[in-house]
Image: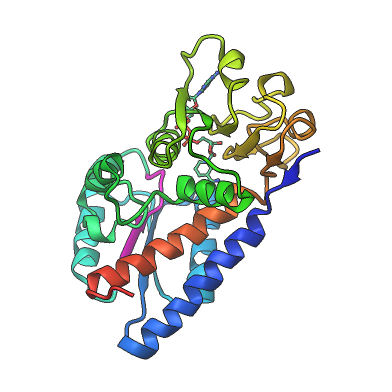
Amino acid sequence: MANIIDGKAVSAKVKEQVRIETEALIQKHGIQPGLAVVIVGNDPASRVYVNNKKKACEAVGFKSFEYALPEETTQEELLELVDTLNKDKNVNGILVQLPVPKQIDDKAIINAIAAEKDVDAFHPENVGRIMIGEYSFLPCTPAGAMELIDSTGVEIAGKNCVVIGRSNIVGKPMAMLLLHRSGTVTICHSKTQNLAEVTRQADILVAAVGRANFVTGDMVKEGAVVIDVGINRLDNGKLCGDVNYAEVEPKASWITPVPGGVGPMTIAMLMRNTLTAAKAQNGIQD
Ligand code: NAD
């Protein structure tokens, strides 16, 4: 029987810490962090994410600026808005909700966001900083997954860590963060052969595949820490992770549920990044 890693509780702690630090920042320095969230088009899932980010901003005491642009927005129009936000002193963090409609090149948008306001940490400068371990922000989902591993008290150094998935927003940075903490890291992907053999070596297994119930019991070592990043919607409307929870839970020592695991951490880490950005942009160290 695994211990359940409670993402809701850990994320609540992170947000409470951000709220306390924000209050102090406002009182001592008169600075209230501001996050601009831009959404283009009518994707219902994106709409939900943006609303949740707005609510989280309010809860920690940030200013939140929302820009809801129509589906037919051109790349030039979006770039113009990003440029305006880059120059706006009230805006410390800028997030353009992905995916954007197909007439817009998401890379061009990410590259246009000022690196110091790139609270998603997707800009090539921030990605490069993560590679060399000199980062100001970490991408929110892998950073949240690291917080959850740390909440277990399990030491990462020297452990076999296997990440399934090599995307730029989850798999690759996750692997790099585990490496920075001296894990022995293997990245698996769609071309990996004998996947189960590799994953069975993992003391810490992170699944970021995007396929419901992909990680089955036979793929997991007895006593492993299992972090499920996947969010998949089943035909019955329910959310489900990449890990077959019923099969894996009895073998794992620690496991994240879906929902209620990594998901809530992503927004909490976004709040932390925005606070960090506000302090850095105002030359505040504490
Ligand atoms: P992605 O589609 O960009 O990447 C999926 C990765 O899985 C790829 O690198 C691919 O090589 C690998 N893969 C696919 N089939 C495989 C197979 N048969 N064997 C081994 N590897 C295989 O997805 P992503 O953006 O990295 O997201 C992954 C999952 O995490 C999705 O379910 C997504 O919804 C979820 N996600 C959750 C959060 C959160 O806040 N919790 C944030 C981002 C993404």
Tell which of 169 and 76 is nearer to you: 169
Residues 181 and 216: in front is 181
Give x and y (percent) for residue 151. Answer: 60, 53
Q: Is residue 104 visible?
A: no
Q: How is the image coloured?
A: rainbow
Is residue 94 depicted above or below 197 in this figure? below
Kindly identify the residue that appears in the image at 76 percent across and 30 percent down: 251
Q: Height in image: 221 above or below 196?
A: below
The question of residue 97 being in magenta is answered with yes
Residue depicted at 28% across the width and 76% down the height? 90
Question: Tag count in the figure?
Answer: 0
Farthest-out residue, top? 193
Judged left or right of residue 83, residue 52 is right
- For the N terminus, which image quadrant? top right
Residue 8 seen in the current view: yes
- The quadrant of the picture occupied by the C terminus is bottom left
> Nearest the camera: 215 or 175?
175
Rendering coords of residue 123 (x, y %): 26, 47
Left or right of residue 266, residue 32 in this image? left
User: Does residue 54 appear to the left or right of 111 in the view shown?
Assistant: right
Q: Quadrant of residue 172?
A: top left
Task: Tell me what residue is drawn at x 54 percent, y 62 percent.
Answer: 52
Q: Is residue 15 magenta?
A: no
Question: Whole-percent x and y of residue 24?
Answer: 42, 84
Instruction: Please identify the quarter of the rendering in which residue 3 is found.
Output: top right
Give the magenta-colored segment's residue range. Answer: 91-100
Compared with 104, 175 (above or below) is: above
Q: For the stretch drawn in magenta, what is the main secondary structure? A: loop
- Give the residue at x 27% y 76%: 284
Could you say where residue 247 lies in the image, as x and y percent from the top left?
78, 28
